Image (cartoon, rainbow, N blue to C red):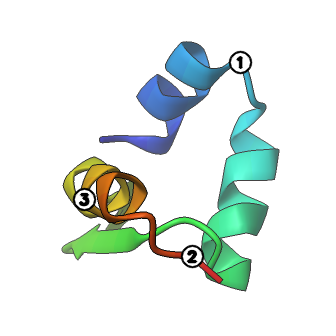
Amino acid sequence: MTIERFSELTGLSPDTIRGQLQQGNLPLYKVGRRRMVNVALLTTECLNGEELA
């Protein structure tokens, strides 16, 4: 999911999301030069109760 769309759905600013991606708190998926939030991995980790950090 794009950073912009994730921002719309969560209410977090795009800058906050970029910071969380850089810190490794959100899973990152790269498509070419674009960075995207890996929502599938995030969902799996949440359902399994795994810690992101």
Tag 2–tag 1 contact (CB < 8 Å): no
Amino acid on which the number 3 mark rests in the picture? Thr
Q: With 1 as the anchor, is 16 left or right in this view?
A: right
Which residue carries the number 3 mark? 44
Distance, label 2 to label 3, CA atoms, is: 11 Å
The C terminus lies in quadrant: bottom right
- Give the image location of residue 44, x and y in percent: 25, 59
The location of residue 28, given as percent across then percent down, is: 40, 71
**Residue 52 occupies quadrant:** bottom right
| Alpha carbon distance from label 3 to label 1 | 21 Å
> Compared to 33, does 16 lie above or below?
above
Left or right side of 20 for 38: left
- Residue with the mark numbered 2: 51
Q: Position of residue 49 (x, y in %)?
A: 44, 64
- Label of residue 11 in the image: 1
Real-space Cα separation, disc 2 to disc 1, in angstroms: 22 Å
Three-letter amino acid code of the residue under disc 2 = Glu
**Residues packed near mark 3 inside 10 Å, few (<14), some (14 to 19) or many (20 plus):** few
Which element is circle 2 on?
loop
Disc 2 residue crowd, few under 14, some 14–19, many 20+, Cα 10 Å: few
Residue 9 relative to residue 41: left or right: right
The secondary structure type at the circle numbered 3 is helix
The disc, 3 or 1, on the residue closer to the chain's N-terminal end is 1
Label whose residue precedes the other's in the sequence (2 or 1): 1
Quadrant position of the N terminus in the picture: top left
Q: Is residue 52 above or below residue 48?
A: below
Residue at the (68%, 50%) spot, across then down? 17
Report the residue at 37% width, 57% height from top: 42
Contact flag, marks 2 and 3 (Cβ < 8 Å)? no
